Structures are given as structure tokens and as C-alpha cells.
Image (tube, rainbow, N blue to C red):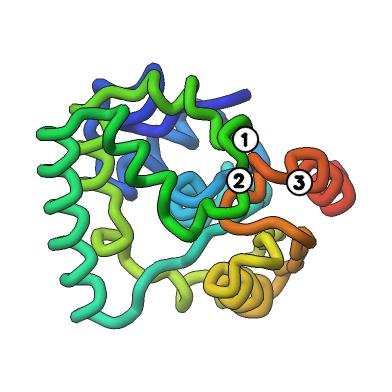
């Protein structure tokens, strides 16, 4: 099952915090292993902490359990709010041009970035997502993950130094963590190396 996060795709009309997004995710998906990329990874980790009876496991791809420094979080909130305001002025196509020009996505070809699907998002939806679910508004979950009883697979592209470090930390913080690094991929690992992602998940997937 593929689920559009609040503010994205067919859920563009839904405004929700990370906590509410996690609740809606589990309400929609039920008892399952949840796979999330980037923002999706952060929401699945929130679901793991808040709704563990229904979350049988989590795959975090290019994800983090949050910023721990309060000043860094405040700065990120301001930056995301400013980005949302800019998005409202320039529109989705120009916003995506800027977004995909970030070094995070430098390893992706134009065919790999999924531009057609991304252009299906709305200005209002993406702006709501930035304001409600940016990293600055995420409560850090590192302490909660130390007591999690669920299996967690942390995946990152080997070229994405920041998220390699975060994936290592995720895998070693939770008692049942596993780390997989995808060679030759950056932050956009699902787009660059989709088959490697699928193989890693199938190799790790908890048995019933």
C-alpha cells in the first residue's frame, strides 16, 4: 500500500502535524511494517514511538529522529516558514527547480527525480507540509528509540555523509536496529537505486 502524506499527492488538502500524520498513517495502514523516505521516514519513526502495537517494524530511508539542539530547531522553523512563503509566490514548478538543485540530489539524473509525480503536488499542500512537518517542528525521538522493541532498518546512500551518520545512529540507538548503506547513491537513494532498496528490505524483512 502506498500512502500520500498530508500535503502531498491525493492528501494535498490535509494539514497535519507530524504527530497527527503518524496517527493518520497508522489509521490508514493498520498493523504493518512501515517504509518511509525522508519526511516519510520521520513520520514512520513517530508512528513507531506513538503507535508501536500496530507498527511491526520500520524502514527509515534517508531519515532522522530529529534535531536535539533547540536553537537549531528554531532556526529550521524560521527557514521552513520562509520557504513556504516563497513557494506561495513562485509556485510548484519553480520551487521544484530550486529544491532539486540542492547538493542532496546532485547524483540524480533528470529522469530519476520523478518530476512528473512531484509536479502533481499543490502549492498549498507543500506549504502546509513545510509549516507543519518541517524538521524544526519534530520532537527528537532518540531517547524514545532506545527502548523500542520493534525492528528498524536504517538505509542511506553511501554518498550522503550526513544521513549515513544519522542512519548509523538510528541503527545503533534502537535495540533491534540494522544498517544498510547503498553504494554509489546519495540522499535520493530510492530514485537512484530502487532495486537495491527493495533487495535490502526483502533481506531484512521480519518473518511473520
Q: From mark 1 to mark 3, how far is it between C-alphas?
A: 15 Å
Is 53 placed above or below 153 here?
above
Residue 206 shows up from this direction: no
Q: Residue at x 48, y 21 (%)?
A: 116
Q: Is residue 108 left or right of residue 124?
A: right
Residue 112 got which mark? 1
Q: Going by the image, does 176 lie left or right of 118?
A: right
Can residue 108 be seen here? The reply is yes
Give the label on residue 108, or none.
2
Mark 3 → mark 2, Cα distance in angstroms = 15 Å
Residue 149's disc number: none
Disc 1 packing (10 Å; few <14; some 14–19; many ≥20): some
Towards the viewer: 25 or 71: 71
Going 43% across and 69% down the picture, which residue do you hit?
A: 141
* The C terminus - image quarter: top right
User: Which one is earlier in the sequence, the residue at label 1 or at label 3?
Assistant: 1
Amino acid at each position: 500500500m502506498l500512502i500520500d502524506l498530508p500535503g502531498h499527492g491525493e492528501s494535498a488538502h490535509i494539514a497535519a502535524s507530524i504527530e497527527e500524520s503518524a496517527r493518520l498513517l497508522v489509521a490508514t495502514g493498520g498493523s504493518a511494517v512501515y517504509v518511509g523516505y525522508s519526511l516519510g521516514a520521520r513520520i514512520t519513526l513517530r508512528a513507531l514511538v506513538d503507535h508501536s502495537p500496530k507498527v511491526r517494524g520500520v524502514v527509515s530511508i534517508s531519515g532522522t529522529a530529529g534535531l536535539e539542539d533547540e536553537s537549531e530547531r528554531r532556526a529550521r522553523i524560521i527557514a521552513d516558514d520562509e520557504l513556504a512563503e516563497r513557494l506561495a509566490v513562485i509556485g510548484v514548478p519553480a520551487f521544484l527547480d530550486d529544491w532539486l538543485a540542492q547538493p542532496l540530489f546532485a547524483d540524480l539524473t533528470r529522469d530519476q527525480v520523478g518530476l512528473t509525480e512531484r509536479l502533481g503536488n499543490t502549492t498549498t499542500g507543500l506549504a502546509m507540509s513545510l509549516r507543519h512537518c518541517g524538521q524544526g517542528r519534530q520532537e527528537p525521538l532518540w531517547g524514545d528509540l532506545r527502548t523500542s522493541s520493534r525492528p528498524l532498518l536504517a538505509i542511506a546512500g553511501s554518498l550522503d555523509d550526513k544521513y549515513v551518520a544519522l542512519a548509523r545512529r538510528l541503527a545503533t540507538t534502537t535495540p533491534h536496529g540494522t544498517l544498510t548503506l547503498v553504494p554509489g547513491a546519495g540522499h535520493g537513494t530510492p530514485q537512484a537505486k530502487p532495486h537495491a532498496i527493495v533487495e535490502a528490505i526483502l533481506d531484512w524483512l521480519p518473518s511473520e
